């Protein structure tokens, strides 16, 4: 079971790196620094491969100990006998499992926030496409025109949302 603790600690480290990369990616997108995105994506892909390998090891350890793949850490700790507790650092296993649980919550929260930003951006882009394509269909343009006296005429706002 100490091997399980090691695997969970490695997973925590990888998810912490993944979260930092996600923050860098968001910053790069905001600053329109798209040159860095392929590098970040490549690192994320490598981290995902490592996570899959560690998950395979974790599942193998749990199967070997008689647990199913999706067992909760509390259930594992409950089944550890008193004699096994002498050989297993259950406190450390609990701490590492809680750290991993918290970093996964942080990753989910970050991804949920990014998805909201993506939806908002997509809605805005779709709206602007509709505004400009509907302007192309009419005889009026989506710009301001001045008459011979310099007054603005035929005003059509392009940012009115319907």
Image (cartoon, rainbow, N blue to C red):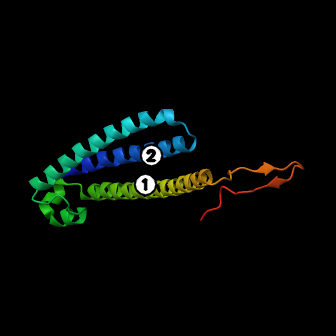
Q: Measured from the top left, where is residue 60 in percent x and y?
A: 14, 50
State the residue in front, 126 or 134.
Answer: 134
| 28 displayed left or right of 105 | right
| 145 displayed left or right of 40 | right
- Say which residue appears at 39% left-offset and 38% top-offset: 41
Q: Measured from the top left, where is residue 47 in percent x and y?
A: 33, 41
Q: Which residue is mark 2?
A: 22
Image quarter of residue 95: bottom left
Residue 95 versus residue 36 in the image, above or below: below
Q: Quadrant of the C terminus?
A: bottom right
Q: Measured from the top left, where is residue 96 in percent x and y?
A: 31, 54
Mark drawn on residue 50 = none
Q: Are marks 2 and 1 in contact (CB under 8 Å)?
A: yes
Q: Measured from the top left, where is residue 148 in percent x and y?
A: 87, 48
Mark drawn on residue 111 = 1
Residue 67 versus residue 44 in the image, above or below: below
| 50 displayed left or right of 34 | left
Most distant residue in the right direction: 149
- Say which residue appears at 30% left-offset and 45% top-offset: 10
Circle 2: is it few (<14), some (14-19), or many (20+) Cα within 10 Å? some
- Say which residue appears at 24% left-offset and 61% top-offset: 73
Residue 54 versus residue 42 in the image, above or below: below
Q: Earlier in the sequence, mark 2 or mark 1?
A: 2
Tally of numbered discs: 2
State the residue in front, 99 or 156.
Answer: 156
Q: Quick one: SS at disc 2?
A: helix
Residue 102 versus residue 147 in the image, above or below: below
Q: CA distance from mark 2 to mark 1?
A: 8 Å
Q: Quick one: SS at disc 1?
A: helix
- Say which residue appears at 29% left-offset and 55% top-offset: 92
Circle 1: is it few (<14), some (14-19), or many (20+) Cα within 10 Å? some
């Amino acid at each position: 079971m100490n091997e399980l603790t090691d695997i969970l600690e490695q997973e925590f480290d990888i998810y912490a790196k993944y979260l930092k990369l996600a923050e860098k990616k968001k910053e790069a997108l905001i600053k329109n620094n798209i040159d860095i995105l392929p590098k970040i994506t490549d690192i994320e892909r490598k981290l995902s491969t490592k996570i899959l390998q560690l998950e395979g090891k974790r599942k193998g350890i749990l199967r070997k100990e008689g647990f199913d793949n999706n067992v909760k850490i509390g259930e594992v700790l409950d089944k550890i006998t008193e004699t096994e507790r002498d050989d297993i650092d259950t406190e450390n296993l609990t701490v590492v499992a809680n750290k991993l649980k918290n970093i996964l919550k942080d990753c989910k929260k970050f991804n949920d926030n990014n998805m909201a930003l993506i939806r908002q951006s997509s809605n805005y882009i779709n709206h602007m496409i509709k505004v400009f394509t509907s302007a192309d269909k009419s005889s009026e343009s989506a710009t301001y025109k001045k008459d011979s006296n310099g007054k603005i005429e035929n005003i059509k706002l392009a940012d009115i949302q319907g």
